[in-house]
Each structure stands twice: as structure tokens, then as C-alpha cells.
Amino acid sequence: MKTSFDRRAVLFLIFAVICFLLIPLAPTEFRFVGELLTGTYVVLAFLSWLDYVSLRTFRRRTK
């Protein structure tokens, strides 16, 4: 199944939004965990998207 977007990147962004929304609900001394996870998921989404773009470009060049 061909998709025009990276499903992993979308999933990581959804996780980042969920973590971001849960930050205010966390106790004050543990809010850094939500912030850290949010940043981590954003970085993972970006890296996953870069992987998707590079593979798509590589496949086009090898055809």
C-alpha cells in the first residue's frame, strides 16, 4: 500500500501531542518527564520523516 506520508512520523507526532497535553496534569516535580518525552517524540518524528524522504528519493533514482 502506497502512502504519500510517513505513518511512523504521524504516530510519533500524535504521541508528542498526547504527552504535551498531559504535562499540566502531572505533578510539578515530574513535569520534566512530559516535556522530555514531547521533545523526544518530535525528534523521532522528524528523523522518521527524513528516513522516509531519503528512501523515497533513493527509490526514484534507482528506477
Image (cartoon, rainbow, N blue to C red):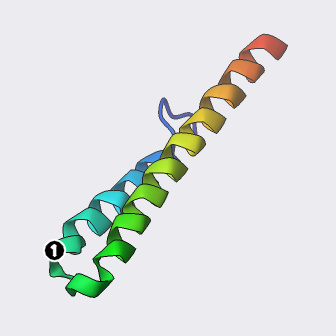
Image side of residue 21 versus residue 2, left or right? left
Look at 20% across and 66% down and name the residue there: 21
Residue 14 position, x and y percent, is 34, 57
- Residue at the front extreme, as displayed: 29
Quadrant location of the C terminus? top right
Quarter of image, res 28: bottom left
Q: In this orientation, does residue 11 appear?
A: no
Q: Nearer the viewer, residue 57 or 22?
A: 22
Q: Nearer the viewer, residue 49 or 23?
A: 23
Neighbor class of circle 1 (other Cα within 10 Å; few <14, some 14-19, many 20+) is: few
Q: Is residue 21 above or below residue 1?
A: below
- Residue at the left extreme, as displayed: 24
Q: In this orientation, does residue 16 appear?
A: yes
Image side of residue 44 versus residue 21, left or right? right
What SS does tag 1 mark? helix
Look at 56% across and 34% down and name the residue there: 2
Q: Nearer the viewer, residue 30 or 44?
A: 30
List the residue tagged with mark 1: 24
Residue 48 position, x and y percent, is 58, 44
Amino acid type at mark 1: Pro
- Residue at the right extreme, as displayed: 62
Residue 25 position, x and y percent, is 16, 80
Residue 23 position, x and y percent, is 23, 72
Quadrant location of the N terminus? top right
Look at 38% across and 52% down and name the residue there: 13
